[in-house]
Amino acid sequence: MGDELPEWMKPHGSPWQVRQGPERLHENPWFALDDYDAVAPTGVASRYFTLHFQNGAVGAVPLHDDGTVTLVGQWRFPFGAYSWELPEGGVPPGEPLVDGAKRELREEAGLEASEWRHILTMQLSNASTDEVANLYLATGLTPVATDPDATEQLAVVRAPLRDVLKAIAKGQITDALTVAALLRLHHMAVEGELGDALTRIVLG
């Protein structure tokens, strides 16, 4: 697929303009908060705050030959709720994104994959952050020892992909990277982008 945008996708109007800034209001190992004196596309003066994330976000879809996927469960602090997710995490600047995805798969799920395929790039909450996620399909899986972060208490399960997709549709799984990656995987199978063997695994 080429880089040329179809006519309906081309930008309209004027972009945001920065008159002054950024002024850094806060910084920690995970993100920084910046303040801009800006002008909106409508010409209205506006103060704009953005979160700059120190690491890139990655996620891996561990797809097994029997049509199951491996998920990890953990409590998420901002929502005070339990979340079932794909293995995912942050990649520091300079580290290849796929290497970060490999590390997260190994540390969180106790798996290594012989085949890796990039399936999706997505912006997360792009009205207020510059965080970008890259998602990968991981196949040819073999077990290894897990090595979670000191703050992570993870449960690891294998669940049928069809059941996970139903849980997404019911709003029982809501993590953005997990939802997007698994819907993308199903879309790839329907559109014939995976090849016969993987398509049979995904669609059953």
Image: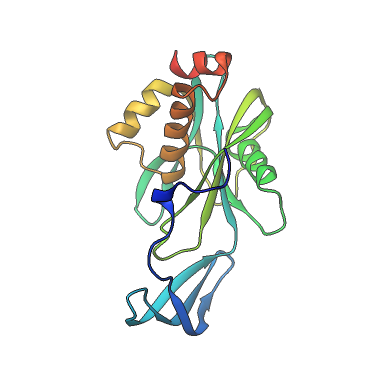
Q: How many marks?
A: 0
Out of 195 and 146, give the one closest to the viewer: 195
Q: Which residue lies furthest to the bottom in this view?
A: 20
Give the side of residue 195 with respect to residue 158, left or right.
right
The image position of residue 159, as x and y in percent, is 45, 23
Out of 116 and 3, give the one closest to the viewer: 3
* Residue beneath the point at 48% across and 80% down: 18
Out of 123 and 5, give the one closest to the viewer: 5
The image position of residue 56, as x and y in percent, is 59, 55
Question: Is residue 108 placed above or below 36 in the rendered structure?
Answer: above
* Residue beneath the point at 51% across and 77% down: 26
Out of 168 and 106, give the one closest to the viewer: 168
Q: Which residue lies furthest to the front in this view?
A: 7
The image position of residue 198, as x and y in percent, is 55, 18
* Residue 190 position by quadrant: top left
* Residue beneath the point at 38% across and 57% down: 78
Give the side of residue 200 with respect to residue 39, left or right.
right
> The C terminus is located in which quarter?
top left
Q: Residue furthest left?
A: 170
Question: Is residue 81 placed above or below 141 in the rendered structure?
Answer: below
Residue 196 seen: yes
Scheme by which the image is coloured: rainbow
Question: Is residue 80 placed above or below 179 in the rendered structure?
Answer: below
The image position of residue 49, as x and y in percent, is 42, 75
Residue 112 seen: no
* Residue 115 position by quadrant: top right
> The N terminus is located in which quarter?
top right
